[in-house]
Amino acid sequence: QVQLVESGGGVVQPGRSLRLSCAASGFTFSSYGMHWVRQAPGKGLEWVAVISYDGSNKYYADSVKGRFTISRDNSKNTLYLQMNSLRAEDTAVYYCANEVTSIAAAGTDGMDVWGQGTTVTVSS
Amino acid sequence: SYVLTQPPSVSVAPGQTARITCGGNNIGSKSVHWYQQKPGQAPVLVVYDDSDRPSGIPERFSGSNSGNTATLTISRVEAGDEADYYCQVWDSSSDHQCVFGTGTKVTVL
């Protein structure tokens, strides 16, 4: 079955960097757009970024633009989120999710399956 | 930026119908997706493209979208439906942004 497993979270000081990974299995990873979504403690869902199935299109939330980079390695069935210049307000559980429809324009589709999330805490 | 507004909470008795609204400017022109999130768990897609259900989602969950309001309807509500629900759209009119609603807590009385 479709499975997404995030890793790479942890405690990091403000201004430092962290890279999250999302390992995919059970589906043709290279055919689906992928999202990162985060949820701060006690808050709602906040979209972070999306990448098209082939990596050619990437879009970011204004809150992370210029600091975060989404990428993917289709040969390894893995999605990444490089997070630089981290701030306290980036503290959240980070989820990866795949889009419902294959070979769709990035972002236009719903988010079908979600991983269990990895926690990022930015604190001095 | 595009804003989606949901009521903070909805209460419903078991067996009754819950309706969760999602308001946005001309939201009827966009595809709306709905997610259910239970405490400590990842979100689950329950309706996509306004009214389609992923496999495994009960027919009790349905969606509609017109004008400035999209609605998720849960029929014959069960205790297990108690959760937070979020609507979501893709706003391509600005800088290509995905937008989530503010979330609605559904309480089963």
Image (cartoon, grey):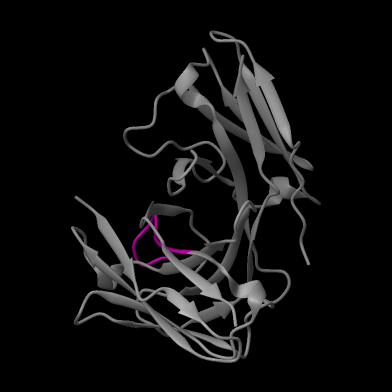
Q: How many marks?
A: 0
Q: Quadrant of the C terminus of chain A?
A: bottom right
Q: Is residue A105 visible?
A: no
Q: Is residue A32 magenta?
A: no
Q: Residue at x 24, y 54 (%)?
A: A2
Q: Residue at x 32, y 36 (%)?
A: B55
Q: Is residue A103 magenta?
A: yes
Q: Residue furthest front?
A: A124
Nearer to me, B89 or A105: B89
Q: Is residue A73 left or right of residue B42?
A: left
Q: Is residue A93 left or right of residue A73?
A: right
What range is drawn magenta here?
A: A94-104
Nearer to me, A83 or A55: A83
- Above or below for B48 versus A87: above
Q: In the image, residue A97 lies at what x, y percent? A: 40, 61
Residue A95 image-quadrant placement: bottom left
Nearer to me, A95 or A112: A95
Q: In the image, residue B20 lies at what x, y percent? A: 67, 31
Residue A87 image-quadrant placement: bottom right
Nearer to me, A74 or B107: B107
Q: Is residue A91 visible?
A: yes
Q: Is residue B76 left or right of residue A78?
A: right
- Above or below for A44 versus A17: above
Q: Residue at x 48, y 38 (%)?
A: B38
Q: In the image, residue A119 lies at what x, y percent? A: 45, 66
